[in-house]
Amino acid sequence: MRADAEAALQRDLVTPEGVALRLKLADGGSRVSAFVIDLLIMLGLLIALTLLGGMALLAVGSRDNVEFIAVVWLLGFFLLRNGYFILMELGPRGATFGKRIMGLRVCARGGERLTADAVIARNLIREIEVYLPLTFLLVQAGTDNVTGLLALLGLGWTVMLLAFPLLNRDRLRIGDLLAGTWVIAAPRRTLLEDLSRAHVATPPFTDRQLAIYGVFEL
């Protein structure tokens, strides 16, 4: 059963240079775990941002500037939740801290280099997948205007889009589908001991070989 599950995640990818690669797609559990780790990291950064906003409010000491600071906080939160993923995945590893810990990375499904357009597209779609419906529900809950049906629709929308990778064979999010990307397993490889440190028998050289090449070169 496990072998069948592993085989179902294997994909053959041919790069534009004609090199055939065998890849393994990230499973659902790994992706969810990576996302939770990233959320915890962003939560820590958000708490720091909130503390800075509170300190700025105390320093100003005027209620007239509360709205301005709130707008700056919301803008900072938007840049944080999108900039974190975009900047990390634009790096050479193509992965956030959560993905690195879980041994995952983002790559282009066509085998070409991962472009900034693809990374930005796949991450901005997350606004529609997760943040927009959740923000709407929180705002409505704060005004006591949310109905049970509306809350159920918003929650169902979020759950459906979050579960989308489990409903297709390539484990694609909506963002992956539109951006042409994959999330693949890229575990760290354990390098073998350096051959120079291993005991290697030195082959015998004749005096004639030593005279031609020298001891250092041989």
Image: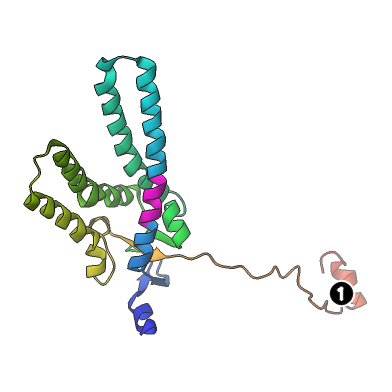
Which SS type dominates the magenta stretch?
helix
Instruction: Identify whether 45 is placed above or below 162.
Output: above
For the residue pair 150 and 196, the one nearer the viewer reads as 150
- The residue that disc 1 covers is 209
**Which residue sits at x=35%, y=79%?**
5
- Based on the displayed image, in which of its 4 quarters is residue 202 positioned? bottom right
What segment carries the magenta color? 35-42
Quarter holding the N terminus is bottom left
Side of 54 where 209 appears, left or right: right
For the residue pair 93 and 32, the one nearer the viewer reads as 32
Q: Is residue 184 magenta?
A: no
Instruction: Identify whether 4 is placed above or below 18.
Output: below
Q: Position of residue 14 (x, y in %)?
A: 37, 70
Quarter holding the C terminus is bottom right
Q: Position of residue 17 (x, y in %)?
A: 41, 65
Side of 157 where 212 appears, left or right: right
Q: Secondary structure at mark 1?
A: helix
Amino acid at dot 1: Gln
